[in-house]
Image (cartoon, rainbow, N blue to C red):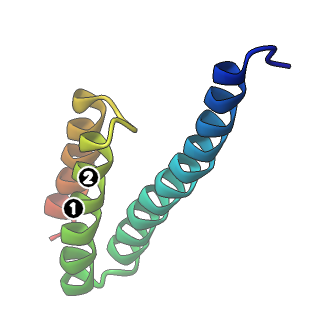
Amino acid sequence: MPNHKSAEKRLRQSEKRRVHNQSRKAAVRTAIKKVRRAIEEGNLDEARNLFRNAQRMIGKAVAKGLYHKQNGARKISRLARALNNAG
């Protein structure tokens, strides 16, 4: 446990950020799963719309520092490749 007032505040802040970041990452993972599921089911029009949304979410997550820039690029690239190979 923190012994200083500033350390206590940092603990509160980091816990709040951890929870917030967890939900953002979960939202990104869900968006990616929706795109993959739409591709598997053959709904390419729906998959394209979902891909745009997932791409936007990944980009925002990278901007917020949740993912490294290259990690975000790799996620988008793999989704785009799966979409292009399907259609």
Q: Position of residue 57 (x, y in %)?
A: 29, 60
Q: Residues within 10 Å of mark 2 (few under 14, many from 20)?
A: some
Q: Which residue is mark 1?
A: 56
Element type where label 1 sits in the image: helix
Q: Tell which of 4 and 31 is nearer to you.
A: 4
Residue at image position (55%, 52%) is: 20
Q: Are marks 2 and 1 in contact (CB under 8 Å)?
A: yes
Mark 2 to mark 1 CA distance (whole Å) = 6 Å
On the picture, is 53 further left or further right than 28? left
Residue at image position (40%, 80%) is: 41
Q: Position of residue 3 (x, y in %)?
A: 81, 14
Q: Quadrant of residue 10?
A: top right
Q: Position of residue 17 (x, y in %)?
A: 55, 43
Q: Which residue is mark 2?
A: 60
Tally the numbered discs. Answer: 2
Element type where label 2 sits in the image: helix
Q: Tell which of 45 and 13 is nearer to you.
A: 13
Q: Residues within 10 Å of mark 1 (few under 14, many from 20)?
A: some
Q: Position of residue 18 (x, y in %)?
A: 60, 41
On the picture, is 52 further left or further right than 32? left
